[in-house]
Amino acid sequence: MFTLAEVASLNDIQPTYRILKPWWDVFMDYLAVVMLMVAIFAGTMQLTKDQVVCLPVLQSTVNSKAQPGTSGKADFTTVETTTDSLGRKTNLDFQQYVFINQMCYHLALPWYSKYFPYLVLIHTIILIVSSNFWFKYPKTCSKIEHFVSILGKCFESPWTTKALSETACEDSEENKQRLTGAQSLPKYVSTSSDEGSPSASTPMITKSGFKFSADKPMIEVPSVTILDKKDGEQAKALFEKVRKFRAHVEDSDLIYKLYVGQTVIKTVKFIFILCYTANFVNTISFEHICNPKVEHLIGYTQFECTHNMAYMLKKLLISYISLICVYGFICLYTLFWLFRIPLKEYSFEKVREESSFSDIPDVKNDFAFLLHMVDQYDQLYSKRFGVFLSEVSENKLREISLNHEWTFEKLRQHVSRNAQDKQELHLFMLSGVPDAVFDLTDLDVLKLELIPEAKIPAKISQMTNLQELHLCHCPAKVEQTAFSFLRDHLRCLHVKFTDVAEIPAWVYLLKNLRELYLIGNLNSENNKMIGLESLRELRHLKILHVKSNLTKIPPNITDVAPHLTKLVIHNDGTKLVVLNSLKKMTNVAELELQNCELERIPHAIFSLSNLQELDLKSNSIRTIEEIISFQHLKRFTCLKLWHNKIVNIPSSITHIKNLESLYLSNNKLESLPAAVFSLQKLRCLDVSYNSIALIPVEIGLLQNLQHFHITGNKVDILPKQLFKCVKLRTLSLGQNCITSIPDKVSQLVQLTHLELKGNCLDRLPATLGQCQLLRKSGLVVEDHLFDALPSEVKEVLNQDTSIPFANGI
């Protein structure tokens, strides 16, 4: 027989799961334990005391005479026992009595009297298994285990106490202000791209109202607890666990269905037990008549037996039926509870009202059902758990942790000087923007990269020197006061994005913006080219830089076309087809169309009367016969056609009289036509990395030439006329086939940079020492050639460069 301890182990659920057992489950568990005790008690009694005692039924003297028609058979309907006070002798020995008792135990005793304890035990085990199956079934057990673990950690987390306590303090402060008739806080409305939705920025706005109100002193919410770094990291991990658990559990309702199913099984089991058990109550009796049909062995045909456990079993059966009835009524109540309210939906409405976390989302399916079950244990669990479903709460935690880590001193250490000698701070992959950033009042450039929850508060108005802002995959939200400051002071904005929706809406309203750099995908049909908003409000925009994959000039660019002086479009190799919009940009002075797969110089360019510089780098241009049309652009001075496939330069280039810079590097040129050297105003000529074998002697006509680059060609002889260009400051002759440098190089008295590395030189002329501005740092040549120079020349070249260079400038 089972012991109570062995059977009770079936009902042994981990103590941590008690929060998921409502009062009816607990009550049914106790009823199951009592039923187990009934089964074990009845079984023990049967093993020790259950027996049947039988005596033969003797015929009376009167009935011993056989009546006619009876054929000598005994009439058992009129049997009588002896009336002798001493009893009548049966002539049966002890073994025969034992035999007949065992025979009649199985034949005369009702089966329910014999198997009642075992049936109770089996039924109880089934009920126990049904009650706790959802804790054992693998597909629900894992979810329940994770839920209980996360719930316990959320309940005990110091962040939960801090968040609820601080919101309570905020509520009390607000109520106090209402009672005293204080003026309402100034309204800071976020103008971010999702401002129309009930976003999580509202508490941030309210908090900023406390901090930046100009009407009254700053109100600081007292911190109830101090959250150390370890607690903060644990809270961050909890937010992530809750987010993943919610996504994992909310997609199904298996736990709910399983719980409903096991409750239905218990209810059906209760009805079944009650129906068949009630019929056997009256079958359990003390006296039984037994007809074993063993007259040939015993000599008697009928026995009268007594069952000594009948009274006890009947009482136990009545007790069992009573327990089953109570159990069944609880099952019916459970079903009523399961179907009375929608348990696959859970609202945190009360929690939102009490905690001021208005963004706690309602949950559904198994997540909702588990929270309903927890509420039956203690509603405080759900209230504290809701803190970890709130984005506002998570953002507050990140803000606190961020501000603890990134102090003013640490940020100051990360400030550097950029190429423009401006103070620059670059923040990368942070959870937000630290408050101390806005105390760096002398900062010129602020770069925010991969900070998805970046918020710019009104405190940015302290940064009076800030004129340049970079947002790299950072859809920053700004408060109204912060926006007003940026609108009036920001001059340069860089926005790098994956989708155009990441561009904050407030970007299009910065009316004093001078430079705008957009880097990202603008060619999607959903993006409508450049945008959510028109650029029409950017009335002072002068420079627009677009690095994308455009197929045509975005129509919205034409909104600011009259104001633009510089337009840069860097494509990723996508062919730019439609260029008619360029004609509207009458004030554009600089135009760059790089990597746009252009095959010719677009005709629309020749309508830009104010164009001064054109850059068509990295295209597929093979011929430039249209170059003659540049003669109509009176202000045109710089033409950059580098990294193309140009084979020759047309002689019509001579008509561009005002051309000062010509860049033709990385093409397929084999010669330089004399027409190039008729451009008397030419100051910079770059033909590096072509296949040019000869420098024409006409180069001496370029008296204003200051920079000449012919690196990476096939030049072997330098014409003497080259050294008549006495204004040369940069001369790049590297990676050619030059065997000697004429002594006339000394005529280049303004030379500051001379590249000779990669040639076939065996020596350098000593006259290099006469190039007054040339120093070793500007001389790019093999070390052994420099070492072979006379010592006095090397000494001149090694002199301090600062004073002579300044005089040369």
Image: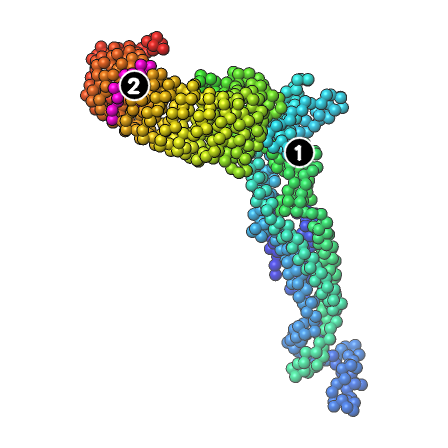
Q: Quadrant of the C terminus?
A: top left
Q: Is residue 15 visible?
A: no
Q: Which residue is mark 2?
A: 731
- Quarter assignment of residue 592: top left
Q: Viewer-proximal residue, 346 or 51?
A: 346
Where residue 692 appears, as percent x and y from the top left, is: 27, 27
Report the span colored magenta.
Answer: 693-710
Q: How many marks?
A: 2
Compared across the picture, whether 185 is left or right of 673 comes to right
- Quarter assignment of residue 167: top right
Above or below, 103 against 444 in this view is: below
For residue 358, which numbered disc appears in the image?
1
Above or below, 549 against 49 in this view is: above
Marks 2/1 in contact by CB < 8 Å: the verdict is no
The residue drawn where x is 62% and y is 49% is 253
Q: Amino acid at mark 2?
A: Leu
Q: Viewer-proximal residue, 775 or 542?
A: 542
Q: Amino acid at mark 1?
A: Ser
The residue drawn where x is 51% and y is 26% is 584
Compared across the picture, whether 732 is left or right of 76 comes to left
Compared across the picture, whether 748 is left or right of 74 comes to left
The residue drawn where x is 42% and y is 20% is 636
Q: Secondary structure at mark 1?
A: loop
Q: Residues within 10 Å of mark 1 (few under 14, many from 20)?
A: many
Where residue 717 appears, as percent x and y from the top left, is: 22, 22
- Quarter assignment of residue 799: top left
